Image (tube, rainbow, N blue to C red):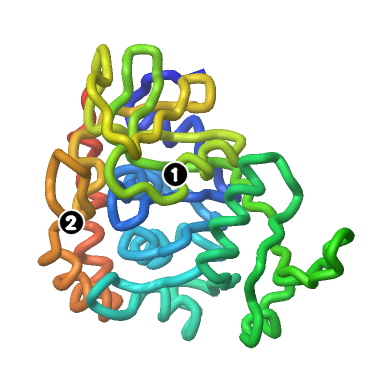
């Protein structure tokens, strides 16, 4: 059942060293504030899952929070590489990072399987590609009805899912509108969850046709954190800060520049955006 907490308390209660953590949001509603709080609390040995790891995962990796990354694409969208991720994979700085790479289709189906409490996902894919040669978790099954050979991957079942959403009502129901990724599936697949939201309201009011509502009984901790997705965007609240994504390339290239930026902008900051 949903509980309203401060961001600091929500992360402290739900995220533990060694956890498998999924932080989702596709271009839109990326949970930056929650990721920064994980860094401030010094969580370690996390297995990070995300369909499209971008800057927030670059920061978590560079600050030593992650031991493994499960993903289907990694980069700074529209700019280039994630330099802290590359440094960890190629040079083991700040320490070794194991990677498990999938296709988008595999990840989406794996989340759906986890949400349905199934052990694995089955789909048509991975035909004529070499990724299965380097990822032992990509396997195949034969359909018992047609004989067709299909791809299979383990279900994604995180210890904790973390998402940012637009609104929560007084009961803890959560509203997402605009571009939606696999936020719903991630929460339903996880044992625990943290949802940061732009605001708490009495009623959601008129909703768009693609609105997703997570019932309060599917949600764990909720923290009201205005601008909690910045520098990504929140539909109807603020735009994406494209200039920051461009600036991050230079910040992240050099280890000392990266650490100095993180110390000033994350470690010395607090969760001041949250609302009690």
**Can residue 276 be spotted in the picture?**
no
- Look at 19% across and 78% down and name the residue there: 250
Residue at 45% x, 29% y is: 214
Residue at 39% from the left image edge and 59% from the top image edge: 60
x and y, in percent, of residue 269 in the image = 20, 45
Total of numbered circles in the picture?
Answer: 2
With respect to residue 82, does 265 lie above or below? above
Q: Quadrant of residue 199?
A: top left
Near-viewer residue (37 or 184): 184
Residue that extends furthest to the right in the rendered view of this protein: 144
Q: Secondary structure under badge 1? A: helix
243 relative to 40 in the view: left or right: left
Mark 1 Cα-neighbour bin, 10 Å: few <14, some 14–19, many ≥20: many
Q: In this view, does 75 lie above or below 237?
A: below
Q: Where is residue 215 in the image (x, y as percent from the top left)?
A: 47, 23
Instruction: Give 170 or 141, whichever is nearer the viewer.
Output: 141
Residue in the picture at 62% in, 55% down? 110
> Would residue 179 be visible to someone looking at this image?
yes
Residue 40's spot in the image, x, y percent?
A: 34, 47
Q: Residue furthest front?
A: 146
Q: Which mark is residue 72?
A: none
Give the position of the C terminus as an image quadrant.
Answer: top left
Apparent side of residue 154 relative to residue 182 in the rendered image (left or right): right
Circle 2 residue: 264
Mark 1 vs 2, N-terminal side:
1
Q: Where is residue 128 in the image (x, y as percent from the top left)?
A: 64, 87
Q: Distance between the residues labelled 1 and 2?
A: 30 Å
Is 96 placed above or below 110 here? below
Residue wearing tag 1: 183
């Amino acid at each position: 059942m949903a509980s309203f907490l401060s961001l600091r308390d929500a992360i402290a209660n739900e995220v533990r060293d060694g956890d498998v953590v999924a932080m989702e949001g596709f271009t839109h509603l990326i949970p930056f504030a929650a990721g920064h709080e994980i860094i401030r609390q010094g969580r370690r040995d996390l297995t990070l899952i995300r369909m499209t790891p971008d800057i927030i995962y670059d920061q978590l990796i560079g600050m030593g929070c992650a031991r493994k990354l499960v993903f289907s694409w990694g980069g700074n969208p529209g700019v280039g590489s994630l330099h802290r991720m590359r440094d960890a994979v190629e040079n083991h700085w700040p320490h070794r990072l194991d990677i498990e790479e999938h296709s988008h289709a595999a990840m989406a189906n794996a989340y759906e399987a986890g949400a349905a409490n199934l052990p694995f996902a089955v789909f048509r894919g991975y035909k004529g590609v070499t990724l299965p040669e380097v990822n032992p978790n990509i396997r195949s099954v034969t359909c018992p009805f047609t004989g067709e050979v299909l791809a299979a991957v383990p279900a994604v079942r995180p210890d904790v899912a973390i998402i940012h959403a637009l609104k929560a009502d007084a009961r803890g129901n959560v509203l997402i509108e605009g571009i939606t990724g696999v936020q719903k599936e991630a929460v339903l697949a996880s044992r625990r969850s943290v949802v940061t939201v732009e605001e708490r309201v009495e009623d959601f009011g008129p909703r768009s046709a693609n609105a997703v509502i997570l019932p309060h009984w599917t949600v764990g901790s909720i923290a009201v954190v205005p601008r909690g997705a910045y520098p990504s965007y929140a539909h109807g609240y603020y735009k994406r800060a494209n200039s920051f994504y461009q600036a991050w390339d230079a910040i992240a290239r050099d280890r000392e520049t990266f650490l100095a930026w993180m110390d000033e902008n994350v470690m010395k900051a607090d969760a001041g955006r949250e609302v009690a």
